[in-house]
Amino acid sequence: METQQLTTLAGVIDKKMNRQLKQYIDICARCAICKDACHQYVGTGDFKYLPARRAELIRQIYKKYFDKAGRFVPALYEARDPDENLLEELYESTYACTACRRCMYFCPFSIDTAWILSVAKAMLIAAGMGNEMLSQLADAAIMKGDQPELFRDVLVSGFKDIEAEVREITGDPSAEIPVDKEGADILYVGLAGAHSIRPAAVIFHEAGASWTLSLFESANYGFFLGDAEKARKIADRYMDEALRLGVKEVVITECGHAYRVAKIFHEAWSGKKHPFRVRHILEVIDEYITDGRITVDPGSVKGAITYHDPCQIGRNGGLFEEPRRIVRALAADFRDLTPNREQQWCCGGGGGIVAMSEFDEDRIKSGAKKVEQIRATGATIIAAPCENCRLQLEQLRDHHELDLHITPIMDLVVEAMPLAGTKAAQA
Amino acid sequence: MSDETKVDLELDLKGLLCPLPMVKVSQNITNVPVGGVIRAVATDPGAMADIPAWAKSTGNEVLKAEKEDGEFVFLVKRVK
C-alpha cells in the first residue's frame, strides 16, 4: 500500500476520533473482562472476536500516526500502519461484531467497542473494503427513495393484497391500510414484507387509531455498513414522509436497529429536531392494552413462553418492561431468560451479520449462550421483536434441534384478540 | 419477455422474508455467466420492489417481475 493511501486511511481515524473515543483508546487496561461478555468470543474462542482485540487494531493505527512514542518507536508501542494485513484482520473483527454493546456494559470503564468499530468501518469503506452485501442492500433502499415513482404502484398493489387479508382477519370489510394519509396521527414504518404490516394493521384498526403506512421499510443496511450518509438517506425516506403528512408520531415496527436509528441517531445525522415523537410498536401496543383500546385474552398463549431482548431495543434502546407487560398479558406461564434486560445475551444475529454469508459458521457458534439460556427456561415459545434475532433463532433452533416456536409479539397479540374474522394473523 | 427465456439458475425463495430474497439473488448472480438469467420465485410481496431496486442499483436487469398464482416470479439477467 502506498504511503499516501496509508496517510489517507489514518486521516479517517483522525477525523472520526473525538475526545470520548480517544479516551477509550487510552484507558483500556486489557483486563479482558470483556472476553466473558462477548457472545462471539465465548461461542467461538477466536481471539479476533475479543472486544479489546477488535479495538486494539484501531488503537495500533492511532498510535502510529497520532502518538509521539508510537510514531518514533512503533515496534515498542505496537504501532502499526493500516496495511492490507491489518485491514483484513480489521474487516473480520469489525463486520462480524453485532454491536450488541454487552462488552461495554461489563467493561469497568464502559468502553464502547461498537463505537470504536464505527471508526473501523469508516476506514474500511475508505479503503474500498466495506462489506459488499450491506452496501448493495443500502443502495437498493436509497434507489427506492430516489425514484419512488418506479416502485409506488407495485408497493401499493401489495398493500391492497394485505388489506384484503386484514379484512378477513378482522371480519370488517371496511378495514383499511391507508397510504399517504395527510393529518394521520401515526406514520407506521414496517419492513418490506407483509408479515410486519398485516398484524400492525389489525391492531391499529381494532384500536381505532388514526394511522397511515409508510411506502418505505424501516430496515437500514447503511447503518450496519457503517456509512452514516447512506444510513441518513435511508431514514430520510420515511422521516420526510412523516414531515410531509404532518403526523404526530413515527412508529417503528418490530425491528431493533431501525428503532435505534429513528429514535436515537437520525436527529443527530440530519441536524434537525423531529417535530413528532418516535416510538416502537411495542410501546404503542402496551399503551393500547393498558388503556383498554384493544382487548386480549389473558390465556391465549398456551405453554411456557420466554422473551428475548433484542440488543438494539433493550440494552441500547431502553425498552425492557413494555414487551414483558404485553407477553404477560397474553400468557399464564412466562419464564424470563437469565440473565435478562441490560445483561441479556446477544443471540448472535444482529449488526447485519445474517446477510453476510462469510460469517455463517461463526454466527451459529456464537449463539451457544442463547441456546443455553433458552434450554434453561424449558420454554417452547420465544417472543423476539426483531427480524434479525428471529432469523438467527430459527437457525439456532434447527441447528440444535430445539422444540421452539419463534414469534413476533404482534402476532401473539392479534391471536389473543377477539376478532370477528376467521383468518389467522399470519399466512 | 417470453417464457422461452433460457434460465441458467433456478432459485426457490419461497418462505423467505425481505430482504433475504434480494440477498439470495445477489449472492447467486455471480453463479451465472454474464448474460445469464436467474429465475427466482418468492412469496414475500416486498420482493416486488426489492429485487428490481437491487438490479437497478447494481446495473443488472430484471426481465420479468410478475405475480403468478400468489407467488412472485422474477427473471434476472446478469449484465456485468
Image (cartoon, rainbow, N blue to C red):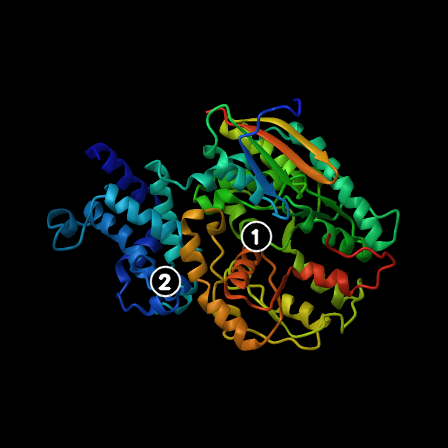
Residue at left offset 28%, top offset 63%: A28
Crowd class of label 1 (few under 14; some 14 to 19; many from 20; radius 10 Å): some
Pinpoint residue A174: horizontal percent, then vertical percent.
Answer: 88, 47
* Residue A263 marker: 1
Would residue A310 be seen by someone viewing this image from the given angle? no
**Quadrant in the picture for the N terminus of chain A:** top left
Q: Is residue A270 above or below residue A390?
A: above
User: How far apart in space, not on screen, are marks 1 and 2 (Cα)?
Assistant: 33 Å
Please state if A81 lies on the left or on the right of A283 as rendered.
Answer: left
Amino acid of disc 2: Thr
Q: Is residue A149 above or below residue B47?
A: above
Amino acid of disc 1: Lys
Q: Nearer the viewer, residue A151 or A121?
A: A151
* Residue A44 marker: 2
* Residue A43 marker: none
Q: Chain of mark 2?
A: A
Pinpoint residue A76: horizontal percent, then vertical percent.
Answer: 12, 55
